[in-house]
Structure formats: structure tokens, C-alpha cells
Image (cartoon, helix red, strand yellow):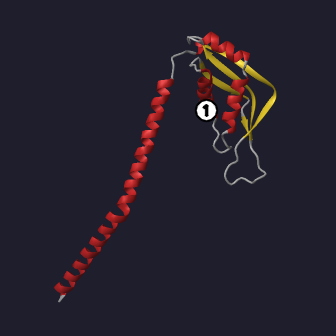
Amino acid sequence: MKKNILTIVIMAATLVNLILTIVLVFSVMPAMNKTGNLVDKVASIIDLEIEDKDAEEEEYTVGDLEPYNIEYEKPLNINLQKDPGDAADKAHYAQLSGIVVSFNTKADDYSAISEEVQKADIYVQDIVKETIGEYSKATIDETKVKQEAVKKIREKYNTKCIAEISLKGFLIS
């Protein structure tokens, strides 16, 4: 009699194990595969961005850079996008005292581009203001703003002469 009860318990445990294995295979594994695919996609996107940054980098030293200052008489306030969940009357802004555009003096079109920018620096100012205004208080990052602004300025002037920009007195409120 004891052998029959032991056999029934073993059969029941085997049956439970089989059922749990089937549940695991058909419900948990597809979710794990989707997560694995998402991680693979994110990793490939990160690799592409790293390659793009390396491809765009030009060789220059700090001594090769010539700064051009754009100063504001009073600090400039730039409205930021609203964060999700903010009250309707709560507005955030970024404050900017000036912009420094650094030209690469070793670039082929250095003299032409530097003269163009210095004659009409309003285009650089507009690009920087528009770039800052695209962010909200939660998403703004000074490094990203500068990189995106340099990219847009380079596209506007069709040059690689503009090496970087600096934001003077950059504050967020």
C-alpha cells in the first residue's frame, strides 16, 4: 500500500513539473525574448551614436581655436517646454548671458565663415535659443544643447570650421 501512495505522489509531482514547464515555455519565454531583442536594439543604437561622434571629430588643439564672444546687455530668458504633470501656470526658463563660438583656425574655410558669423551673429543666437527652447526642465542638459546647437550651426553655414560653443551664465529655473 505504501508503494502505491509513493508512486501516486511521484506521478503527481511529475505532472505538476510538466505543467509548470509548459507554462514557463509558453508564457515567460516570449516575454524574455522580447526583452532581449529590445536590449539588442538599444545596444546597436548606442554603438551607432558612438561611431557618429568619432566620425565627426576633427583634429584640433585648444591653440587652434579662436573664440568669438556674443554678449547680451541683460541676461536673456528663454522659455522651456512644459514638463508632463506640471501645473498649467508653472513655467520654466533658461537664462543665458552670452555665447562663445569657437572657430577652428586650421579649417579651410575659417576666414570666410568667421567673417560671416561675426557680421550676422543673429543666426547663431537664434539657433541656440531655438535649441534650448526645445527642451523641458526635466530633459535639458547643457552638453546635449551645445552639441545639438553646433550641429545645427554647422548645417546652416555648411562648414566644420565651428568647433564648439560655450554658453555663458547658463542657468535653469
Quadrant in the picture for the C terminus: top right
Q: Please tell me which residue lies in front, 112 or 143.
A: 112
Q: Would you identify the image quadrant in which residue 31 lies?
A: bottom left
The amino acid at mark 1 is Thr
Q: Residue at x 43, y 49 (%)?
A: 38
Q: Is residue 91 above or below residue 25?
A: above
* Residue 146, percent from left and from top: 63, 30
Q: Is residue 75 above or below residue 63?
A: below
64 with respect to 98 (left or right): left
Q: Residue at x 22, y 78 (%)?
A: 11
* Residue 89, percent from left and from top: 79, 51
Q: Please tell me which residue lies in front, 2 or 114.
A: 114
Seen as rendered, the residue at the extreme right is 73
Q: Would you identify the image quadrant in which residue 167 lies?
A: top right
147 with respect to 12 (left or right): right
Q: Secondary structure at mark 1?
A: helix
Q: Is residue 63 above or below residue 2?
A: above
Q: Residue at x 68, y 35 (%)?
A: 132
103 with respect to 29 (left or right): right
* Residue 52, percent from left and from top: 48, 29
Q: Please tell me which residue lies in front, 3 or 94.
A: 94
75 with respect to 131 (left or right): right
Q: Total marks drawn? A: 1
Quadrant in the picture for the N terminus: bottom left
Residue at image mark 1: 143
Specify few, some or many for label 1: CA neighbours under 10 Å numbering under 14, 14-19, or 20 or more: few
Q: Residue at x 18, y 86 (%)?
A: 4
